[in-house]
Amino acid sequence: MKDNLKIISVLTIITVICGFILAFVFTSAQGKIQENQKQAIYRAITTIVPEAENIQEKTYGEDLVYELKDKNGEFLGYAYVTDGQGYQSTISILFAVDKDIRDILGIDIIESVETPGLGSRITEDAFKDQFKNVPLAGIFEVVKELPQNPHQIQAITSATVSSRAVVSIVNAGIEKLKAILKK
């Protein structure tokens, strides 16, 4: 009995010490994690809109919208990060639209934990390029065959759930951005 109490006490002390160390490391790394996330967003913006040299963050209530300008200060459009449920976890997507919100300029996947080799293919250029320079006159839809119009996005074979998730997230994000900017 005495040995059991001794073992339990030692394990409890070790567990508490490890918990404090993990909490300290997590707290210490928070600033670096947020900075890395911000840099990923800025890289994604400049990938979609290479001429965007001046990126300004504007807060609309709880929403953050990025206003994009070229080196001469000419307004190019907006970028917005939206997320939603994928097959395995949340998918975070950044998309950019032109200044009149008539065309989507492109998308980039900021965060995704989809199935490797299948759903993870949403991060490939071949899939993301389907969203480049498409008029926002209609909503995007997923198709399994070759697209017949620019609003049709060809699903990744065996990963239709992830493909549908991206399309759904982008459609919802565009509607949300339009509502935010109307205010």
Image: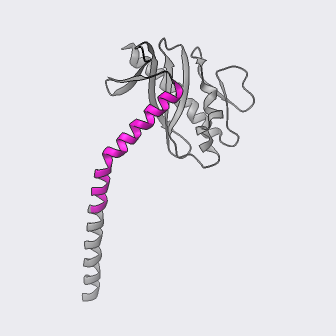
User: Of residues 49 and 112, which is closer to you in this image?
Assistant: 49
Where residue 8 appears, as percent x and y from the top left, is 28, 78
- Identify whether 161 is placed above or below 55: below
Magenta-colored span: 21-49
Q: Residue at x 32, y 28 (%)?
A: 62
Q: Position of residue 23 (x, y in %)?
A: 29, 57
Question: Is residue 41 inside the magenta stretch?
Answer: yes
User: Relative to 69, is 106 on the left or the right?
Assistant: right
Return the x and y of residue 153 as percentages of the image width and height.
65, 28
The quarter of the displayed image where residue 20 is located: bottom left
**Magenta highlight on residue 138:** no
Question: Measured from the top left, where is residue 21 in percent x and y?
Answer: 28, 62
Q: Residue at x 30, y 69 (%)?
A: 15
Q: In the rendered image, which quarter is residue 74 located in?
A: top left
Of residues 106 and 70, the one nearer the viewer is 70
Residue 1 can be seen in this image: no
* Residue name at image x 46 percent, y 31 percent: 82
Residue 19 visible in image: yes
